[in-house]
Amino acid sequence: MSKVWFCGYRDWALQIYEGVVSVNETPITLVDSEEAFDRISPMFGVGDLVFFVGWSWIVSKEITQKCNCVCLHPSPLPKYRGGSPIQHQIINGEDHSAVTLFCMDEYVDKGPIVFSKSFSLEGSLDAVFSRIVDVGRIGINKIINQHINHLFPPGSPQKEEDKTYYKRRSPEMSEIKLMDLLGYTAEEIYNKVRALQDPYPNAFILCRDGTKLYITEAHHE
């Protein structure tokens, strides 16, 4: 009998796992680090259902071809493929995103979509992640139920003509410079600050003596 695995280590990913486990009679094994994945992944069987939620490491083609590998990506794919999707969307002024579950292949965030549901990007980063958790649980529970009833969906191909790709943000990109204050609106600066709230590298201003003034919360009129 095929098994269900959940690969994730971020706080919001673990919250999704806890919510999924609490309502499922099907055993779901947690893999919460790269080291654990290297140790446990040889036990993945043909046809096993493996979720990757907030996962940062490469998954081999051998695994994606052997198992039903489903990745949760917090963007309306094919838009915002790649790293730091939530941060890029908020900084770009998007007001809505989506939790997208797709079947993984050898390409980045490119496989057929098996679930997608919109959510608001308004408010603090904590509020945004709370919505991702709620919608993520709905999607993953739906896929698990389909899997155990042998109704795993083939998914819908992504529209390549709509794709956008962003690289993972680095800590130095969190700086707010004088030219930003002069060139952007209060709302745009506000979006950058809230997009970079904990646990991400906070927005900061580099001061004359080389020290950094971190800005973790902002309001605008």
Image (spheres, rainbow, N blue to C red):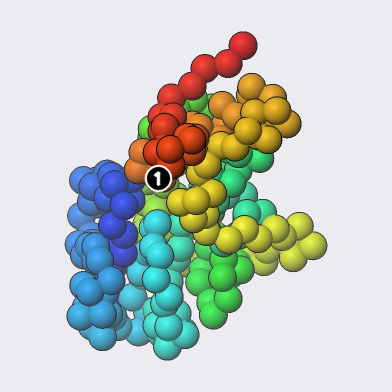
Q: Residue furthest front?
A: 209
Instruction: Looking at the picture, tell me which residue is in the foreground, 205 or 143.
Output: 205
Residue 116 seen anywhere in this rendered image of the structure? no
Residue position for label 1:
200
Looking at the rendering, which quadrant does residue 79 occupy? bottom right
User: Image height check: is 106 above or below 136?
Assistant: below
Residue 164, image x and y in percent? 70, 58
How many numbered marks, from 0 up? 1
The residue positioned 47% from the left and 35% from the top of the image is 207
Residue 60: quarter of image: bottom left
Query: Going by the image, does 115 lie left or right of 50?
Result: right
Identify the residue at image location x=53%, y=77%.
105
Q: Amino acid at mark 1?
A: Tyr
Question: How many residues crowd mark 1 within 10 Å: few (<14), some (14–19), many (20+)?
Answer: some
Residue 150 position, x and y percent, is 41, 69
Where the C terminus falls, by quadrant? Answer: top right
